[in-house]
Image (cartoon, grey):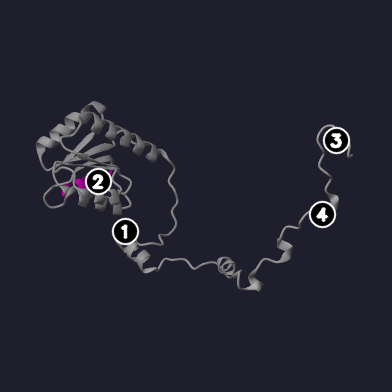
Amino acid sequence: MSADMKVLLVDDHEDNLFAMESILAPLGYPLELATSGDGALKAALHGGIAVAVLDVVMPGVSGLDVARYLSRLTQTQLIPVVLVTGMGHDAATADEALRLGVADYLIKPLDPWALRIKVQYLYRASALLALAPPRRRGPRTHPADPDQLAAQLRSGQRQSRPSDTAARVSRWPDDPESRPSDRMRPTPPDPARLSPAPGPPGDDRA
């Protein structure tokens, strides 16, 4: 990863931005600030973002919207996202964040130590990922929209057909032709070739 890779901080309240900036400054990472979801998307599309810390509730484009857009774009889908909110714990928001694959979901007021450790870990993980050789991907065979994929799975369009072997196995009890041949069955041992088991010590039967 290039030394100028940045941590993107997004909040529509400048005092919250200043607080997050003060918390993360000791890490020494370059920081980029944005006060809106639109600004966050523009910064991410320009490149050079290692980690994004997004406020959930913002006018217009929310933090969840930003996370959703980033996850759908090839050039931004690997950016780890931390969502922060001052609205308390909301189950629906937490479920949506989990579905989008965000790295963490934090409640304000932020614990400085927790935020610093989380960002440091994600920044280093991004650095290792950037050093890895690029993986060649084949053509996409499924829709990019998770909701469309889920709809296809529910309708059974992507269900695979059972193999002929599985069908034959299911008919074994009633179809003699589908049963394994005798050649496939293990041959029982010949009793005449088995040596007698040794008797206990002192046994003179031998």
Task: Say whether marks 2 and 3 touch (CB < 8 Å).
Answer: no
Q: Which of marks 2 and 4 precedes in the sequence?
A: 2
| Residue 178 locus on image (x, y percent) | 64, 70
Q: Which of marks 3 and 4 is in front?
A: 3
Please tell me whether residue 89 is drawn above or below residue 26 in the rendered image.
below
Which kind of residue does numbered mark 4 sit on? Asp
Give the distance between the C-alpha atoms of the residues marked 3 and 4, in whole angstroms. 26 Å
Vertically, is 166 above or below 133?
A: below
Q: Is residue 19 above or below residue 189?
A: above
Horizontal placement of 127 versus 25: left or right? Answer: right
Residue stretch in magenta:
38-47
Report the residue at 81% width, 42% height from top. Answer: 197
Q: Where is residue 15 in the image (x, y as percent from the top left)?
A: 10, 35
Mark closer to the observer (2, 3): 3
Q: Which amino acid does label 2 sit on?
A: Ala
Q: Name the residue under label 4.
A: 190
Q: Distance between the residues labelled 2 and 3?
A: 87 Å
Q: Where is residue 129 in the image (x, y as percent from the top left)?
A: 38, 40
Using a 10 Å C-alpha cutoff, classify the residue at mark 4 as few (fewer than 14 neighbours), some (14 to 19) or many (20 or more). few
Hey, which quadrant is residue 198 in on the image? Answer: top right
Mark 2 or mark 1, which is nearer to you? 1
Q: Name the residue under label 3.
A: 203
- Say the numbered circle drawn on residue 44: 2
Q: Mark 1 points at which residue?
A: 146
First in sequence: mark 2 or mark 3?
A: 2
